Amino acid sequence: MSSEDHKTARSRFRRTNRTVASQVGARFARPDDDNSNSAQLPHSTKATVSSTPFGDVSLLSDDRNSSTNNDESEAWCGPFSVARQMINDREAAKRKLEESRRASTEQALGHHPLDQILAKSEKAKVLRENPSQSWKAVVSADDLMIKRNYYAKRRRRYENSRTSVKSLFSISRDFIVDNLECVEGLGDVDSNIRKALSLRIVETNKMDGEALKVIAEPGVEVLEIVDCARISEDVMATTLSTLVDTGLTALNLNYCGRCFCNKGVKAIIDSYERKTGILESLSIGGAYNITDIDVGKLLETLSTTLKSIEFKACPQLGMKFSEAVAQYNNLMELSLEDIPLTKSCLLRLATSKAASNLRSLSLVQVDEVDDDIIQSFLKSCGEKLEGLHLKHLRRISDVTLSNIRLHNTKNSLRSLSLSGLAQLTSAGLETLFTGEIEGMPNAPMLRELDLSESKSGTVTDEVITSAAKASSMKYSGSKEGVSNLGGLVFLNINGANNCTDKSLEVIAATCYSSLVELDASFCSLISDQGLGFLVSKVRDQFEVLHLWGCAQITDSFLDGHRRVRKGNTDSAEPLNIVGTWMKRMDKSGM
């Protein structure tokens, strides 16, 4: 074979490869084509049919010189590159075609004089249905200067949130705690001050026997220690004996498994035998060593004065405890958390004369509590009950919601917690708060409502709307209306992933003069507009807003709402927003 014949064969081979690559690339660009058509060689019949927008490259003339063929060979990068180029060109052509069609349509139809009026009417209708959409962030000159600098925004927000000067109380408290070993006593100070000092001592890990002597001086009326882990049993027994003799009225010990056992119980009982004390409130948490018999004896001794009982995480309580509580005549508050009582023990409590005078009932993580137990409690105290707190009870269903409304005949219920109740439904909650239902009392007019950690889809806009409206209603005989004095003071909808800005609009309309704290953490459908609208409408008594897990909330709200602190100006008290460090930056600015 001569050199000229060799060049001709090589050129024909290159053209064949390029044709096959083009046809394979066409299948990448057109996935809806029949995949059964395989690539054909250029000498076959089907090879003459173009498979690309550029025509069939096999029809190129054979008399191209070798240099042209070399350039084509170097430009080719495989079927994926060919397909990508074809797709790019196809999309560009499609956009151009749509633009030309739109232009021709507008030219044919022309502009109608009423188009602008209709557009304004539609916009006004949307704003009437969703007024939060009209909210705009308040932007200052400084905001415009640093709106692209995320770290400058964070630094300014942190500086604005800090109090410029520490209070005299904070300085004095910290000084006392730092020099606690030199303090012999506090003298005649209020119980709130002692509580604040106690908290600070616990925070600095200094709460031991010596610190207890400073806090629990003879004559103290309230002893509240949030962490007793470093206090010995003997020191606590001696302290309690002295305090009960000198007029202790409230005892609150948490994490007291080490210090509050048989000796502590005996010290209180011995003090009452010497002289009847005036202890009215007892709260014990984490006392894992205290026995059911000891608690029964303690409560029997305190039955003449005790009005509030709370036990948390005390695993040995049982029937002796229930029998002792059942004998009370003036018990007003009962709170049980993580207590392994049997159903018979709970029924003994629910049907006793002690339950008939209850004003507040709290049951948290008590596994045997079911609808029957709650119904028994409500039959005993439903007319007088002001606070009902049910949390993380796996046997509670919508039946309890019906019983709550049926037994609230005097509309005395003001605080309701239904947190972590997996069997509740949105229909049950909406029925609980619906205004008028024939044969049932009015919906509860609540001041505090906790619907956190409910099952997904349970807490909806309709539920919040019904609850907020019911809380703001006033009833006078057969008439009803909205009361300016009513409304929710505290609302927790943590985890309500079906609540939208509509809920915030209703809260702003019904609770504008009452709302103090709102927890909207992990509510993924609320937006900057909804929160900004709420803050703009609610008065300055609104103090705390929780927004953990709301990554959709941006700087547009955080730096643009009405209650942002602007330096050291004497404007309204800034809103305390908790949980905003986990969020997404608003890259578009304000």
Image: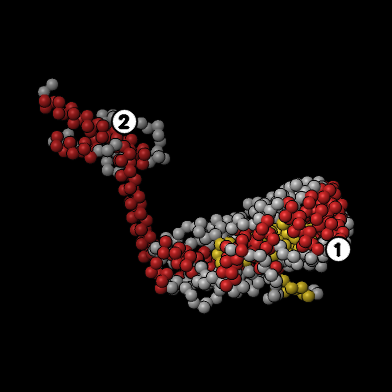
Q: CA distance from mark 2 to mark 1?
A: 107 Å
Q: Is residue 452 above or below residue 118?
A: above
Instruction: Give how far across and how far down residue 153 sits, in percent.
Output: 44, 65
The residue depicted at 71 percent of the width and 49 percent of the height is: 258
List the single residue furthest toward the bottom: 570
The residue depicted at 47 percent of the width and 57 percent of the height is: 584
Specify how the rendered protein is coloured: secondary structure
Residue tagged 1: 276
Instruction: Give how far across and how far down residue 553 sits, in percent.
Output: 51, 61
Q: Is residue 303 above or below residue 572?
A: above
Q: Which mark is residue 40?
A: 2
Q: Quadrant of the N terminus?
A: top left
Helix, strand or loop at label 2? It is loop
Say if mark 2 contacts mark 1, CB within 8 Å. Answer: no
Q: Earlier in the sequence, mark 2 or mark 1?
A: 2
Instruction: Give how far across and how far down residue 134 sits, in percent.
Output: 52, 70
